[in-house]
Image: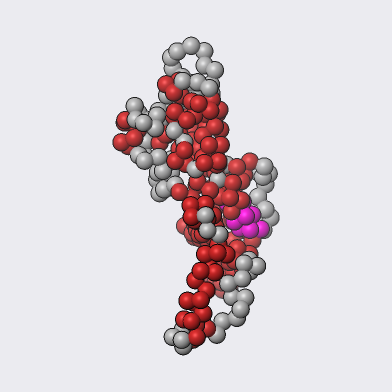
Amino acid sequence: MTNDGTTAGAASKADGSATGSGDIARSLELLWGAGERPSRGPKPGLSLDRIVTAAVAVADAEGLAAVSMRRLSTELGTGTMSLYRYVPGKAELLDLMLDRVQGEPFAARPDEPPADWRAAIDGMARGHLDNLRRHPWLLKINQARTVLGPSALRGLELALTGLRGMGLRDPELIGVIIAVNSFVEGLARTRADEAEAVAQTGLSEEAFWDNQRPYLERAMLSGAYPVMADMSQDTFSAEFNHFEFGLERLIAGFDALVREREAERAASRT
């Protein structure tokens, strides 16, 4: 047992921030309901759902690093070893946490997709951004090898269903999802990093830039940066909504591609 309450094996397999780094077979059993109940011991007072819920709550409040089997045992009022009867360790728990929160944007959504693919992209982007704001620890996770559970697959199914009307090839539809999610995650990561910097340094964003202003003003007057010196006073205004601007441009770009493909199909028919 390590100091953070994980087993030595789990600690050696992952640092707790990469999905798919634990026992993949066990994670899949737990995700798909094949191994929820402990195989031995007295009648359980816990459940896998309670453990995952507690883990997500700790991560939301204090970050992913605060999640450990020992901490969860305190939150749930049970012994640490009791948790291992349900989940092997933090690496597998992370797979369950990720699937849980990935399903949230779709939990309250009707199964019928939006009638228009533009509305589907808009809803996808806004839902993803809201989810990252609720769970900023998602931005710290390496999801290159995600173990797919039912919530993740349902989300992908609904997203693809909403995009079918674009008339694009299947790899291109996946490309649309990647482009939208990457755009959203880039903005969300910037905001999360700003908040983290304030918390770590105690220096507000305004004070940070005020410290640099005299140097930047001299640089603009030097003539070495003519393009930036000629920009308007509101160039970096916080009132400009980069999310809305970027999302509109993304949809417009995809719209141009859809129209191009429609024209190609019409030409081939004639």
| Whether residue 192 is visible | no
Residue furthest top in the image: 42
Q: Is residue 10 left or right of residue 146?
A: left
- The rendered magenta stretch, by its main secondary structure, is classed as helix
Q: Is residue 135 left or right of residue 67?
A: right
Residue 229's spot in the image, x, y percent? Answer: 52, 83
Residue 172's spot in the image, x, y percent? Answer: 49, 60
Q: Quadrant of residue 49?
A: top right
From the viewer's side, name the closer residue of 75 and 119. Answer: 75
Q: Is residue 212 left or right of residue 1?
A: right
From the viewer's side, name the closer residue of 256 and 6. Answer: 6
Screen quadrant of the C terminus: bottom right
From the viewer's side, name the closer residue of 68 and 31. Answer: 68
Residue 29's spot in the image, x, y percent? Answer: 44, 29
Position above or below: 79 against 49? above
From the viewer's side, name the closer residue of 264 and 149. Answer: 149
Please say whether residue 121 is one of the residues in the magenta stretch.
yes
Q: Quadrant of residue 65?
A: top left
- The colour scheme is secondary structure
Q: Which residue is pictured at 60% across the width and 63% down the height?
A: 243
Position above or below: 261 against 29? below
What's the magenta region? 119-128
